[in-house]
Structure formats: structure tokens, C-alpha cells
Image: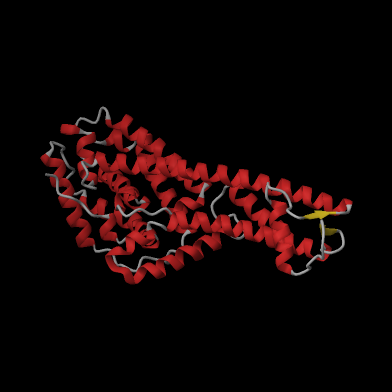
Amino acid sequence: MLLFLADIFLTVLYARAGTGLLAPSWNRAIWSALRTVAGPLGRHRGVVLSFGGPLIVISLVFFWASGMAIGAALVIQPELGTSIRPSSGDTPTDFITALLVAGNSLSIVGSGDYSPHTAGTRVLFFVNSLIGASVLSLVLSYLVQVYSALRERNALALNIHLMTGSTGDAAEMLARLAPGGDTSSATSELGNLARSLAATKEAHHFYPLLFYFRFEEPLYSVSRFSFVILDLVTLIECAVEVNAQLARSAPVASLRQGSRLLLETLDRSLPTPTRSAEIISRTDLHDSYTAATETLERDGIRTRAGGGEAYVAARAAWEPLVRRVAPALGYTIDDIARRTVRS
């Protein structure tokens, strides 16, 4: 019981990613099992994985309840037939009976037909009832916070997607933030994004269950919106000619650091490979830069001559992190880096 209570304390109250004693391993095991089941399903794989978060929530609550009940049963079983007896008849002393009595004593409905007959067992039942009611309240409050944070994360992802004109292209987003090269309002817009991103990063640190909420639409993926933000920041710093103040602004630095911290949090907490299995093609990165500069110039934003090498070097530094995290959540790099041509 102390082991499971410590796990609940570290997961729910201490609220730091990876600090639980049992829950992190349990969550990873359920997610890995679900990925194994979904693997052969082809195009329906994403549908199955989208149930991962809710299934892990249910399984974790069951895991904690079962662990506490088993712990209480181990304490209660030696007392069956002596200090813990039913109101009438013989007292079974098997473990299943002890588990039933333990479950009842932990619940808010009482201890059923069995009652304590000594001061020690009365205290035990009283403590069990307090533990059961407290844990139930804590877990319910925790789940409310998890779903609230999930809504905020989805709102951030959708906002970024819409700011790209629903294309998923950071160059399109930059063109909308600085129409005709006018960056006067870009700093405030990026500041709003930076605040939302910081809140999302901290939410994943507080509520590790968020890692496993995976949606069919890649636009809601942490990997996807982090990719777009990092690509946006890289373009601001390397591609735009008149951008000295914007590139050195606090929102741009916050977006870069916040995105990397969020990806690093997931990288540490999820079963990701040590390094990306895919080799990043410098030719592909140069092609991405060329396409981005064409988009910017089409919208009246002057681009820097010779910025391609700086862009490739910067992107090669952060893209491996995206490529490690994305597959752990069932996405491919094509899902994350997909761009839709603006109509």
C-alpha cells in the first residue's frame, strides 16, 4: 500500500514527468502493447492509437485501485476470523475474501457484512476509508486537469495550423505574420504563441499522461506544431533579410527554447530511439529552404542572399529530435513535415 500511495503521490501531487515509481513504466507498457496491436492494421493504425490516451487513463486508475486493494488485503487476511468477522456465520480466511473486505473498506460505501472487532482493526478500517476517499478525490481532480491541459494543447496546435493557412508551412505562417515585410505586429503575435507554448510545455511536465493522447489528425501532434515553430524561427533567423530586431526578440528565443524543451521532455519520457534511424538529406533541406524563400518573396518579403547554409545547419541541429519523438507517437516524418500547397 505504501508503494502504491507513494506512486500516486509522486504522479498526482509531486507532478513531475518521470518521477512516479510504477505509473511511468505501466503507461509505457500499455502504450507499447497498443502500438504492437495497431502495427499490422495499416491505414487504420492511427484510429487504434487514438484510443491510447483514454485507455491508459482507465488502466492506470484500475492499476492503482488494484494495487491498493491487494495491499490492504495482505494486511486484512491474517485478521479474518479473529478481529475481523461477519455479523453471522463462519468467516472464510482465503485471499479473495480478504480482497473483498479490503475493497469495501477502501470504498466510500462501507465494509459490507464484515466488521472490525478490535481497536486496531477499527483504526485500520478508518484509515482505509480515509485513504480510499482521498485517493479518489485526488485522481478525479488530476484527470480533470489532464483533460483541461489537453484542450489547451489542441487549441495551440490548431491556432498554429490556422496561422499557416492550413498548409502546415512555416513560410506561409511567416508571410502572414509579416505581410509585405512589415514585422511591426509579428513580435506581439509571436509573444502570444510563446506564452501558450510555455504553458503547454509545463502541462506535459506536470501531467505525463498527456504524452499518450494521440489524435488521427497530425496537426494536433506535439511533433507537428513544434516542427512548424522551429522551422518558423529558423526562417526568421536565417532567411529574412530585414529581421535583426525580430530575430533577437524575446518571443523568438522563447519559441525556439520552448519547442526544444517540450520535445526533449517527450524524448526523455517516451521510448524513443537513441538517435534518428533516418539520415537527414542536406539536399532535401536545401529544397525546403528554396521553397520557403519562394513563398516569402511571392508575398513581398525580401530574403537574405546565402542564407541557405545557415538554415540547413540550424535545421539539421533540431530536426533529429523531431524524428525521434514522432515515431514514438505513431507518426512518420512525412506526417509531421507535410505541407499543403496554398490554393
Residue 38 vertical placement versus 243 (above, below)? below
Task: State the image coordinates of residue 34 (x, y, percent, origin top left).
Answer: 43, 65
Task: State the image coordinates of residue 338 (x, y, percent, origin top left).
Answer: 23, 54
Q: Front-most of 283 and 37?
A: 37
Q: Front-most of 337 and 132?
A: 132
Q: Front-most of 38 and 124?
A: 124
Q: Is residue 313 visible?
A: no
Q: Pick the quarter of the image with the N terminus.
A: bottom right
Q: Residue visible at 56% across and 45% down?
A: 140
Image side of residue 21 versus residue 337, left or right: right
Q: Front-most of 338 and 86?
A: 86
Task: State the image coordinates of residue 13 (x, y, percent, origin top left).
Answer: 62, 45
| The quarter of the displayed image where residue 45 is located | bottom left
Q: Residue visible at 78% across and 51% down?
A: 125
Image side of residue 301 versus residue 2, left or right: left
Residue 249 vertical placement versus 32 (above, below)? above
Image side of residue 140 versus residue 271, left or right: right
Q: Residue visible at 23% across and 42% down?
A: 164
